[in-house]
Amino acid sequence: MSLDKPYLDVPGTTIFDAEQSRRGYHLNQFCMSLMKAANRERFKANERAYLDEWLMTEEQKQAVLARDLNWCISLGGNIYFLAKIGATDGKSFQQMAGSMTGMNEDEYRNMMIGGGRSAEGNRYVGEDGDAQAYRQPQGAAGRATPSAAGRVSQTEGKH
């Protein structure tokens, strides 16, 4: 029996529920392994070899190698675990969050200081707000590169 999940209709948001937790278990365990200095050193020395030690899907490994946090989240990653990857790379949480929106660190900081994204137009998929998929990525990255919103996840059917 499938559960009704009305929260799946919130644009730009992946809810980390029991299903996502099961999907991302090994991905999140890998991230937690990066809390140990020896594991961080092994990962940075040969990222692919270290990832191959984990029972992650190939798509999860590719998402980590690409440092695409939105992709990782769509595959069950939890942002608080994924933050360990950013820390391993010497990035602040603010830099990581900015990368998820297509904004650079200054753009993201200024958006947050200004009150963040408005709820107007972002309550449901299909409205006209700035969190809608067709408006991603934002910031300088969104103006400089083609949108990644069209990438199709092999397991999710969307990304």
Image (cartoon, helix red, strand yellow):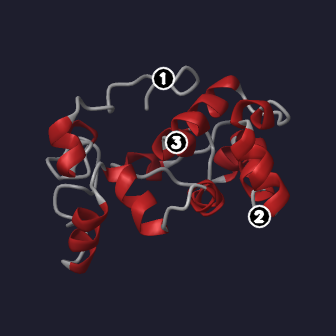
Q: Residues within 10 Å of mark 2 (few under 14, many from 20)?
A: some
> What is the quadrant of residue 113 in the picture?
bottom left
**First in sequence: mark 1 or mark 2?**
2
* Residue under the point 60% across and 62% down: 87
Give the mark nearer the N terminus: 3 vs 1.
Answer: 3
Locate residue 84: give its quadrant. Answer: bottom right
Q: Can you give x and y, in whole percent of width and height, for residue 63 in the image?
A: 56, 34
| Residue type, mark 1 in image | Gly
Q: Which residue is mark 1?
A: 157
Q: Which residue is mark 3?
A: 67
Label pair 3/1, CB-CB below 8 angstroms? no
Out of 76 and 146, give the one closest to the viewer. 146
Helix, strand or loop for disc 3? loop
- Element carrying mark 1: loop
Residue at (53% x, 28% y) in the render: 156
Q: CA distance from mark 2 to mark 3?
A: 17 Å
Going by the image, does 70 lie left or right of 65? Answer: left
User: Which image quarter holds the N terminus?
Assistant: top right
Q: Quadrant of the C terminus?
A: top left
Any mark on residue 35, and which? Answer: 2
| Image position, residue 33 (x, y; %) | 80, 55
Q: Earlier in the sequence, mark 2 or mark 3?
A: 2
- Where residue 117 appears, as percent x and y from the top left, is 23, 65
Amino acid type indicated by mark 3: Arg
**Which of the two marks, 3 or 1, is nearer to us in this view?**
3
Alpha-carbon distance for marks 1 and 2? 32 Å
Q: In front of the other: label 1 or label 2?
A: 2
74 w.r.t. 84: above or below: above
Which quarter of the picture shows residue 151?
top left
